[in-house]
Image (cartoon, coloured by chain):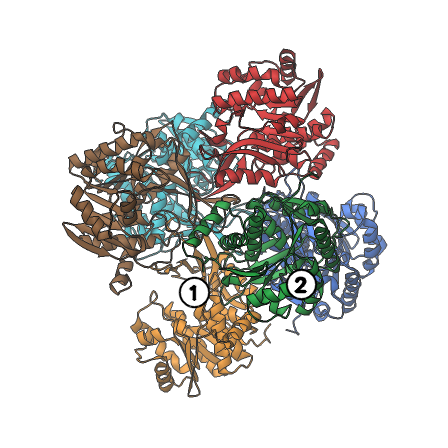
Chain colours: A brown, B orange, C green, D blue, E cyan, F red
Amino acid sequence: MDAVAPDLVTFGETMLRLSPPRGSRLETTETLRFSTAGAESNVAIAASRLGAESTWLSKLPDSALGRRVVTDLRRHGVTPEVVWTDQHRQGTYYLEHDSAPRGTAVIYDRNDAAVATATPGELPTEPIENASYYYTSGITPALSDQLRETTQALLKTAQSAGTTTVFDLNYRTKLWDPEEARRVLEPLFSHIDVLVVAARDARTVLGLDGDASAIATALADEHGFETVLVTRGDEGVVALSDGRVSEQGAFETETFDPIGTGDAFVGGYLAARIRGDELASALEQGAATAALKRTLDGDLAVVTQEEVDAVREQSSSGISR
Amino acid sequence: MDAVAPDLVTFGETMLRLSPPRGSRLETTETLRFSTAGAESNVAIAASRLGAESTWLSKLPDSALGRRVVTDLRRHGVTPEVVWTDQHRQGTYYLEHDSAPRGTAVIYDRNDAAVATATPGELPTEPIENASYYYTSGITPALSDQLRETTQALLKTAQSAGTTTVFDLNYRTKLWDPEEARRVLEPLFSHIDVLVVAARDARTVLGLDGDASAIATALADEHGFETVLVTRGDEGVVALSDGRVSEQGAFETETFDPIGTGDAFVGGYLAARIRGDELASALEQGAATAALKRTLDGDLAVVTQEEVDAVREQSSSGISR
Amino acid sequence: MDAVAPDLVTFGETMLRLSPPRGSRLETTETLRFSTAGAESNVAIAASRLGAESTWLSKLPDSALGRRVVTDLRRHGVTPEVVWTDQHRQGTYYLEHDSAPRGTAVIYDRNDAAVATATPGELPTEPIENASYYYTSGITPALSDQLRETTQALLKTAQSAGTTTVFDLNYRTKLWDPEEARRVLEPLFSHIDVLVVAARDARTVLGLDGDASAIATALADEHGFETVLVTRGDEGVVALSDGRVSEQGAFETETFDPIGTGDAFVGGYLAARIRGDELASALEQGAATAALKRTLDGDLAVVTQEEVDAVREQSSSGISR
Amino acid sequence: MDAVAPDLVTFGETMLRLSPPRGSRLETTETLRFSTAGAESNVAIAASRLGAESTWLSKLPDSALGRRVVTDLRRHGVTPEVVWTDQHRQGTYYLEHDSAPRGTAVIYDRNDAAVATATPGELPTEPIENASYYYTSGITPALSDQLRETTQALLKTAQSAGTTTVFDLNYRTKLWDPEEARRVLEPLFSHIDVLVVAARDARTVLGLDGDASAIATALADEHGFETVLVTRGDEGVVALSDGRVSEQGAFETETFDPIGTGDAFVGGYLAARIRGDELASALEQGAATAALKRTLDGDLAVVTQEEVDAVREQSSSGISR
Amino acid sequence: MDAVAPDLVTFGETMLRLSPPRGSRLETTETLRFSTAGAESNVAIAASRLGAESTWLSKLPDSALGRRVVTDLRRHGVTPEVVWTDQHRQGTYYLEHDSAPRGTAVIYDRNDAAVATATPGELPTEPIENASYYYTSGITPALSDQLRETTQALLKTAQSAGTTTVFDLNYRTKLWDPEEARRVLEPLFSHIDVLVVAARDARTVLGLDGDASAIATALADEHGFETVLVTRGDEGVVALSDGRVSEQGAFETETFDPIGTGDAFVGGYLAARIRGDELASALEQGAATAALKRTLDGDLAVVTQEEVDAVREQSSSGISR
Amino acid sequence: MDAVAPDLVTFGETMLRLSPPRGSRLETTETLRFSTAGAESNVAIAASRLGAESTWLSKLPDSALGRRVVTDLRRHGVTPEVVWTDQHRQGTYYLEHDSAPRGTAVIYDRNDAAVATATPGELPTEPIENASYYYTSGITPALSDQLRETTQALLKTAQSAGTTTVFDLNYRTKLWDPEEARRVLEPLFSHIDVLVVAARDARTVLGLDGDASAIATALADEHGFETVLVTRGDEGVVALSDGRVSEQGAFETETFDPIGTGDAFVGGYLAARIRGDELASALEQGAATAALKRTLDGDLAVVTQEEVDAVREQSSSGISR
């Protein structure tokens, strides 16, 4: 399949997700729900389901666990390009859903994951060079020193090939502290065209002040991003593109499982951009995809274009805020 | 059991209902919940559980699937009077529950259902003639040309025998369009004593204007119904009977599964009328039954008189609106 | 393990709890969730999980059902001290969760439970004498005449040994009527140091008037309790201790299962007192433990000190009311 | 429904059955399967499913638990004639399936069951008088002194009315000892037309020697039974009727759940007799029904005539032994 | 992906499979397992998992049900080439597993399936022309007159393009009778290179006599097949290729679910041929794949090359027969 | 609890066990069963359930995963003595049950487990010194260099204190190769009183020839073990003690889950020795415990003394071989 030019390539870790039934605890449950999850595959899956030819790049242990990851990507139409290894682990995470006042409890068990050893040399870079968009997140360089190097190398590859690079800062307190994150991430900014960042992370990690609009402007000014998307949870997103600021509200949802909301937003946004939508339309599609994701169990936006369009139509009737 | 005179006879299709767990999708789920559902059996079951001797008339494929329908009716005390056939299908429907902003997703798979071929001649009409009430809904004639004929014939049979005829308009956009529905349904009105209709359907299908009260009046005036019940979702019902308009609010509920609410209302209403309740009391029982249904998984109002009475008592303390 | 001095000893009945899935009914469900429940073991478990060495005293049938109770206590660190018998039953209760306007439906099946025959002579009293706190509830003497005698005897034993006695009035309408409850419970008051009582029960059973504060004062005045805790559901608790009244609000929760909330409060409170917390701190820990319990399936507060502390910290930021 | 003459009436206790998943234990399981079970309802259900109009007589607590029993009988076409009471319990039993060398573990929790208080006066005897067959088992008089009296009274009622009486000795070691069983059961024999007894029980309880044939002959000789069916587990049954001995082998099965096999045999046998089959044919249908039951989870023979016939046809090709 | 030349293309119907838990029945079960199944997709999936680039051609309703089919094919690496339609149904089948003496119960609900209307013109034939192997089965032309025409047209297309054509006779009594099957299937034989046929079907449908070897010879002689594979259930397969007869025994298995065994055999066989294995090796891989399938729930051979090789190695140590 | 002298102390790793439903695969399953497993805790649990005061020593991550391990040990009456750490992982293993010809598939995910860093200094040695028996297995030193040192140190501690040391060689091919295992394990033999070893491992790892009896003799001769137990799977065990060889057959079982059989044997054996049984009786109890374990899901012998005795009684009637 060498000749294929994917619309979107993503690179990162996909974990196995293990979660007890609602109201039950890891300490006592007899059963777990078993699925797969990872920012970069979540984005690829959302985009794929909304029409984008998507490829996911990674490194996996050659076992039933690694194959499980591939299986789940494939069923949503994503093409996995995987380096298989007999060494290292398949990362997992355990999740107990929040229920106020009890917060979401996440236990990462991703040390020594195979992907953490992925070198630029062993990964196929052709898909990145041929793609329209390349996406990765700030989780990837947080996983290992090797991945810091690899993240930078792949961003450069994309940049050189004229592939639009998209980066979601995705700061994870369980992986590193704000200072280290900033020290590692800022040098990547010069290779990034589209930055996605939560307002909260911009404050914590990048030390920025002000509202989302101020943050977007500061980032674009300092680093020259083509587009900055500053997300604000249920207050929606502020976009700065070509010097213009625009806003997109979040759709109200009955939330079943909030994990993966941000990735669904990015996947929906990118799928729209890929098919040629204007920024405003892409933001709205991102918001609609994110809203639908929240109604579904698991990290994945198992949605259809029809459903996304239905949410957007409600929005034009004023449901969105 | 020829000599038995049921309180209520209903006629229509009962489907098998297949639904994935909450938050899961038909595209990926490994398991489905399996139950039975159909406006006319839902009404018979609700009424039976509240004390009415109820009989359900239909035609089913002679298979484990057809038997499943009978089994589920029986366990709630309804007497099934079934024409068995080796031809045709058992209708099913797939349901994904809504979770805002995602709507309820229903896939009907009821083409060529055995019941769609039921002729007036093959169905036992004696129960209808002996019954106090006969109920069917606008779904039935929407299923086939044969059923349009059969629906009319059975209504006439009931009318001739002095059995009170109850008809819920139950317009389903997935089965036909408003024009066709009106063309088929209006000629049935002269055989109907009690019409139940959603205000929205009255507007869409029958072209009526105004509020529920105006709709009820217009319908009674034009077609001479003894009683018209105009339902308005969570705003309750407006009844016109003997020229007097009355209202019954809906009880507030934590909704687990809204499917079947309208049928539970009718079943509760009829059970009350059958035992001699005044209109207001019957409307309140209908509303209470409907409220309880919403707290339960599946189409069926698996409730007791005691529970219905408990809801009504809360209501007299002002909880109802 | 004779030499061990537990922090807390509780005495009472633990039942097997059988409940259908949400939205399903005992009349039709194919499956039940199976767990254990009982005020006195609930308290012991909550306290044990929060650091108190806890012992639970009871009498059980020597069967897999009795062993199940022991198994569930042990896994939360409670030491069961059980009199085994070949006679009598293991009590159970069936639970259908409420969903407005449908109320919680409880069917007790606890007649002839082994514990109802427990005599003061056959139970090991040493743990009570060595403990810092002894807890039982008003459910226990409601179960049998024998248990009225045993409850009193054990309270006296504790009192003589200088063990602080804690009693939750826990009035259950399905077990007795207010008059009988009062007649049996009031004579116990002279042996009680800390009384926990719902404001509603104080009115119904003890005939007291006024708000929670008035109730607490009246009770302390009349019976000389060291501490009175008057609970008011989601309005929190009023405490009277050493003549001073203080209040603790309830934390807001997304409630998954409210059963066992009161017991979690007492368990959290006692664990704090046992480790030396001031009253206010203990009340806050009780309220936090109760709030977490409501997010969990089953009667038990399967929580950690860390989680309780996290809720309390939110509270200092003003979330509590 | 006074005028109806059922083919078969049975009287006895139906319990709720609670069993953990295969390989799991009551001590630790989180879930239980929930169903209903009882010799007399098992027989009525098997017979009903094979064409016999069947009525089940009993006394139940007026609760969701009692209603569950009724619900499960109804769905298999049996008419429940129930005396409802606000007193007494619904009997249950806990079952862990055997897996060699571990035996089946049954915990009866049926003390103080409502049915144990059923008097001849409160039960409707008309169905028994109108029926062709009346069936009860030796479990019923084992449950209480009252039921000894009631069992005898109902057998007399049947006998006087010319209803053929069928009695399965069904000795249960957990309910009484052989001496007491013999003392209570033998006086009933003069009212019994058809006795079903396991060879093992005939030896243990009735003190008989020899093989099944000898046992049948001895019983017929001494008590004048019209028919004696001596069952021998997987060696089939020996029948003595009108002085002639005949045999019916058991069909080989992959056993999923053996509980209820004997009841399925009797139900299949009676349904065949009721429709006029000769003894040999009825025995074969009994054996086929029993074999099918063993392939199904739960006590009930949820089978069809078609399936029973298919097994019998295999048998004529020599599969039966 | 026009330029891709798949190793294997298959064409046929894939159904949704609905089955109750072991020991439970469609008449009463609350839950169903939900999966996908179809001879041609089963073969494509088995082959894909064992290394063959596989494409599946079909026509599906444009709904969540049709998408479910695609999803399940994709996750095993098969490329679906689907004609989507807004008309017609998604076929399903209900399955109760056998448990001796109860046989497997299958209820097909596949009338009016979208695929039954697939015309040669609307299906993409390029993949067939580019492929090494084209596979379809005798089920396909049994589904509709249109599919008889389409089956023939596609076989001709493959033949013309030099693609090796493989056809599994797969006679289904529930779809047609032997005479009709023969009348339709024999004219296809001239377009077929490799015929797979159960010995039983060869006798019933094609009227052949003798043992598997005689059947193979007769078929090759009369129709000039390059290869004939005559399967004999647990006695293995007899192959005739280039005039030489060879045999491959079946591996002994603990059977969990036998459905799909034959398809797994063909898929394993084809994957081996595609990578260049000799006939004997391909037969052995087919047998090993079939054996593994029997240990798995569902129609699909969710196996790995490693597992297949492990079974084959056991076989060289003499376990095979 | 310093003063307590446990009967048995074990030291080793306990993992979380994750397994898909029967017939399902890790690649596709939506759910996993979740339990705990580890040779040393399995032995402690079996012994505890059969009356031995048992303590389990280990090091765990301070998380819900580590607490889960403690919870499961406690519910079977074992006292966990745990060193908690904020570093390192909780080991897990994934299990797909075998179904011939498919073998058991185990994926260990235990690298960097907290226990692998446990030093002799941080573990409490008092329980070992006070115990009658100390048990560990050859898995423990296979996990890390640190554990080789710690295993030796703890064995020496036990030996010095006069605690009888029991060691199960438990060779795991996934952890090391035979040469390395031998090099590490043989130096431990001088500190071991009772060696348990599978005949197969004795051949593979220790290079011994001959039958079980010869192996036992060779081992006792060379290393001076007080007792050697050579296990032979379903052929039972050969014991050499005080120079006398004896045999104990395995009980025949319907195997539900064979994992943990060997540990159940050792646990049953030790519990019998601890209460003073002779060797032959202890071997028989070990075999009976092992047989029961095989009928249960999970690694644990969730059995009672009563059940073990029932199996042994059958054995005296000749069922054992």
Task: Say how many tags the image has.
Answer: 2
Label 1 to label 2, Cα distance in Å?
52 Å
Q: Is residue F308 above or below residue C111?
A: above
Which residue appears farthest toward the top when viewing the image? F222
Q: Which amino acid type corresponds to the residue marked 1 in the rendered image?
A: Pro
- Mark 1 is surrounded, within 10 Å at the Cα level, by few (under 14), some (14 to 19) or many (20 or more) other residues, namely many
| Label number found at residue C223 | 2
Residue underneath mark 1 = B258
Q: Is residue D38 above or below residue F141?
A: below
Residue A236, quarter of the rendered image: bottom left
Q: Is residue D134 visible?
A: no
Instruction: Say what secondary structure mark 2 lies in.
Output: helix
Q: Position of residue C211 (x, y in %)?
A: 55, 69
Q: Is residue B65 visible?
A: yes
Residue F286, quarter of the rendered image: top right
Q: Chain of mark 2?
A: C
Q: In the picture provided, is A149 more to the left or to the right than B53?
A: left
Q: Chain of mark 1?
A: B
Q: In the picture provided, is F140 more to the left or to the right than B90?
A: right
Residue C129 versus residue E52: which sits nearer the camera? C129
* Quadrant of the image containing the C terminus of chain D: top right
Asked if marks 1 and 2 touch (Cβ < 8 Å), the reply is: no
Q: In the picture provided, is E297 more to the left or to the right than E63?
A: right
